[in-house]
Image (cartoon, rainbow, N blue to C red):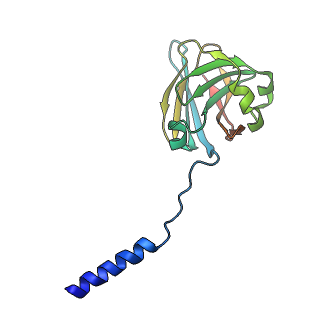
Amino acid sequence: MRYIRAGLLALGCIAAALPRPARAGGSSPLLSLAGADAFATAAGVRSVDVRGSFNFEDVVEGVFPAGLVVVQGTHFARFDQAGAVVDGSAAFLANGLDASEVPALVAQGAPAAAPGALTQLRADRVTVVLPPGFTSGPASVVLYAVYGGGGFASNALTVTLP
Protein backbone atom coordinates (compact mmCIF):
# COMPACT_ATOMS: atom_id res chain seq x y z
CA MET A 1 0.00 0.00 0.00
CA ARG A 2 2.89 2.32 0.82
CA TYR A 3 4.31 1.78 -2.68
CA ILE A 4 0.97 2.61 -4.30
CA ARG A 5 0.74 5.88 -2.37
CA ALA A 6 4.33 6.75 -3.27
CA GLY A 7 3.61 5.97 -6.92
CA LEU A 8 0.48 8.12 -6.95
CA LEU A 9 2.34 10.96 -5.27
CA ALA A 10 5.11 10.72 -7.89
CA LEU A 11 2.55 10.76 -10.73
CA GLY A 12 0.88 13.80 -9.17
CA CYS A 13 4.20 15.64 -8.99
CA ILE A 14 4.99 14.79 -12.61
CA ALA A 15 1.53 15.94 -13.75
CA ALA A 16 1.91 19.22 -11.85
CA ALA A 17 5.26 19.86 -13.52
CA LEU A 18 3.98 19.29 -17.08
CA PRO A 19 3.20 22.40 -19.15
CA ARG A 20 -0.47 23.29 -19.36
CA PRO A 21 -2.12 23.51 -22.78
CA ALA A 22 -2.54 27.08 -24.00
CA ARG A 23 -6.05 28.39 -24.40
CA ALA A 24 -6.75 31.02 -26.99
CA GLY A 25 -8.37 34.22 -25.85
CA GLY A 26 -10.29 36.65 -27.99
CA SER A 27 -7.91 37.95 -30.60
CA SER A 28 -9.79 38.75 -33.75
CA PRO A 29 -13.50 38.19 -34.25
CA LEU A 30 -14.62 35.10 -36.13
CA LEU A 31 -17.81 35.99 -37.98
CA SER A 32 -19.62 33.67 -40.35
CA LEU A 33 -23.19 33.52 -41.69
CA ALA A 34 -24.75 30.28 -42.88
CA GLY A 35 -28.37 31.23 -43.58
CA ALA A 36 -31.05 33.86 -43.19
CA ASP A 37 -34.84 33.94 -43.34
CA ALA A 38 -37.27 36.87 -43.29
CA PHE A 39 -40.82 36.96 -42.00
CA ALA A 40 -43.65 39.48 -41.82
CA THR A 41 -46.75 39.72 -39.68
CA ALA A 42 -50.17 40.56 -41.08
CA ALA A 43 -49.56 44.13 -39.83
CA GLY A 44 -46.37 44.36 -41.94
CA VAL A 45 -43.81 44.05 -39.13
CA ARG A 46 -40.72 42.42 -40.63
CA SER A 47 -38.20 40.25 -38.83
CA VAL A 48 -34.99 38.55 -39.90
CA ASP A 49 -33.54 35.36 -38.43
CA VAL A 50 -29.84 34.76 -39.15
CA ARG A 51 -27.86 31.58 -38.50
CA GLY A 52 -24.09 31.49 -38.27
CA SER A 53 -21.29 31.72 -35.75
CA PHE A 54 -19.25 34.35 -34.00
CA ASN A 55 -17.11 34.76 -30.88
CA PHE A 56 -20.19 34.46 -28.68
CA GLU A 57 -18.47 34.67 -25.29
CA ASP A 58 -16.48 37.77 -26.31
CA VAL A 59 -19.60 39.42 -27.73
CA VAL A 60 -21.78 38.70 -24.70
CA GLU A 61 -19.06 39.83 -22.30
CA GLY A 62 -18.61 43.05 -24.29
CA VAL A 63 -14.97 42.37 -25.17
CA PHE A 64 -15.58 44.15 -28.48
CA PRO A 65 -18.58 45.90 -30.05
CA ALA A 66 -20.44 43.55 -32.37
CA GLY A 67 -23.83 42.90 -33.85
CA LEU A 68 -25.90 42.48 -36.98
CA VAL A 69 -26.59 44.93 -39.79
CA VAL A 70 -29.52 44.66 -42.19
CA VAL A 71 -29.02 46.76 -45.33
CA GLN A 72 -31.50 47.62 -48.08
CA GLY A 73 -29.91 49.95 -50.63
CA THR A 74 -28.28 52.64 -48.50
CA HIS A 75 -30.77 52.22 -45.62
CA PHE A 76 -29.53 50.20 -42.65
CA ALA A 77 -30.58 48.96 -39.24
CA ARG A 78 -27.79 48.06 -36.84
CA PHE A 79 -28.45 45.80 -33.85
CA ASP A 80 -25.67 45.63 -31.26
CA GLN A 81 -25.05 42.97 -28.65
CA ALA A 82 -26.41 45.22 -25.88
CA GLY A 83 -29.80 45.43 -27.63
CA ALA A 84 -29.47 48.95 -29.05
CA VAL A 85 -31.05 49.42 -32.47
CA VAL A 86 -29.83 52.19 -34.76
CA ASP A 87 -31.46 53.19 -38.04
CA GLY A 88 -29.94 55.30 -40.77
CA SER A 89 -28.63 55.73 -44.26
CA ALA A 90 -25.07 55.63 -45.56
CA ALA A 91 -24.09 56.09 -49.20
CA PHE A 92 -21.10 53.75 -48.84
CA LEU A 93 -23.52 50.84 -48.27
CA ALA A 94 -24.78 50.95 -51.86
CA ASN A 95 -22.17 48.35 -52.82
CA GLY A 96 -22.39 46.32 -49.59
CA LEU A 97 -20.49 46.59 -46.32
CA ASP A 98 -16.73 46.22 -46.39
CA ALA A 99 -14.82 45.49 -43.16
CA SER A 100 -12.94 48.78 -43.51
CA GLU A 101 -16.30 50.64 -43.42
CA VAL A 102 -17.50 49.08 -40.14
CA PRO A 103 -16.07 51.79 -37.83
CA ALA A 104 -17.78 54.48 -39.94
CA LEU A 105 -21.06 52.56 -39.88
CA VAL A 106 -20.92 52.21 -36.09
CA ALA A 107 -20.65 56.02 -35.85
CA GLN A 108 -23.74 56.65 -38.04
CA GLY A 109 -27.48 56.56 -37.48
CA ALA A 110 -29.95 57.41 -34.74
CA PRO A 111 -32.02 55.32 -32.33
CA ALA A 112 -34.54 53.29 -34.32
CA ALA A 113 -38.28 53.62 -33.94
CA ALA A 114 -40.44 50.77 -32.65
CA PRO A 115 -40.82 47.94 -33.38
CA GLY A 116 -37.06 47.70 -34.09
CA ALA A 117 -35.53 45.24 -31.62
CA LEU A 118 -32.92 42.57 -31.05
CA THR A 119 -35.08 39.65 -29.92
CA GLN A 120 -32.56 36.80 -29.78
CA LEU A 121 -28.77 36.54 -29.52
CA ARG A 122 -27.26 33.08 -29.28
CA ALA A 123 -23.96 31.52 -30.29
CA ASP A 124 -25.47 30.38 -33.58
CA ARG A 125 -28.50 32.63 -34.15
CA VAL A 126 -29.54 36.27 -34.15
CA THR A 127 -33.16 37.34 -34.59
CA VAL A 128 -34.18 40.96 -35.10
CA VAL A 129 -37.35 42.95 -35.74
CA LEU A 130 -36.78 45.67 -38.32
CA PRO A 131 -37.71 49.29 -37.69
CA PRO A 132 -40.09 51.05 -40.12
CA GLY A 133 -38.71 52.00 -43.51
CA PHE A 134 -37.75 48.59 -44.83
CA THR A 135 -39.83 47.46 -47.80
CA SER A 136 -40.52 44.19 -49.56
CA GLY A 137 -37.58 43.05 -51.63
CA PRO A 138 -33.94 42.08 -51.32
CA ALA A 139 -31.82 43.09 -48.36
CA SER A 140 -28.46 41.91 -47.09
CA VAL A 141 -27.39 40.85 -43.61
CA VAL A 142 -23.87 41.04 -42.18
CA LEU A 143 -22.39 40.33 -38.76
CA TYR A 144 -19.94 43.06 -37.74
CA ALA A 145 -17.39 43.72 -35.02
CA VAL A 146 -14.90 46.41 -34.07
CA TYR A 147 -11.71 45.15 -32.49
CA GLY A 148 -8.40 46.90 -31.94
CA GLY A 149 -9.68 49.92 -33.84
CA GLY A 150 -10.39 47.89 -36.98
CA GLY A 151 -13.59 46.62 -38.47
CA PHE A 152 -14.55 43.04 -39.17
CA ALA A 153 -17.46 41.85 -41.31
CA SER A 154 -18.84 38.42 -42.04
CA ASN A 155 -19.85 37.20 -45.43
CA ALA A 156 -23.01 38.97 -46.59
CA LEU A 157 -26.19 37.00 -47.21
CA THR A 158 -29.11 38.18 -49.29
CA VAL A 159 -32.57 37.75 -47.84
CA THR A 160 -35.88 38.69 -49.45
CA LEU A 161 -38.05 40.75 -47.12
CA PRO A 162 -41.76 39.88 -47.52
Quadrant where the image shows the N terminus: bottom left
Residue drawn 25% across and 81% down?
A: 5
Q: Position of residue 4 (x, y in %)?
A: 25, 84
Q: Is residue 69 above or below residue 52?
A: above
Quarter of the image where one finds residue 64: top right
Horizontal arrangement in the rendering, residue 49 relative to residue 140 (left or right): left
Quadrant where the image shows the C terminus: top right
Residue drawn 50% across and 37% down?
A: 60
Q: Position of residue 154 (x, y in %)?
A: 67, 41
Residue 135 visible? The answer is no
Q: Nearer the viewer, residue 48 or 89?
A: 89
Q: Position of residue 40 (x, y in %)?
A: 54, 20
Horizontal arrangement in the rendering, residue 137 relative to residue 40 (left or right): right
Residue drawn 59% across and 39% down?
A: 35
Quarter of the image where one finds residue 98: top right
Residue 74 visible? The answer is yes
Q: Is residue 18 above or below residue 5?
A: above
Q: Position of residue 132 (x, y in %)?
A: 61, 13
Q: Nearer the viewer, residue 111 or 149?
A: 149
Residue drawn 74% across and 27% down?
A: 104
Q: Is residue 68 above or below residue 3?
A: above
Quarter of the image where one finds residue 156: top right
Outermost residue toward the left in this view? 1
Q: Nearer the viewer, residue 5 or 136?
A: 5
Q: How many marks?
A: 0
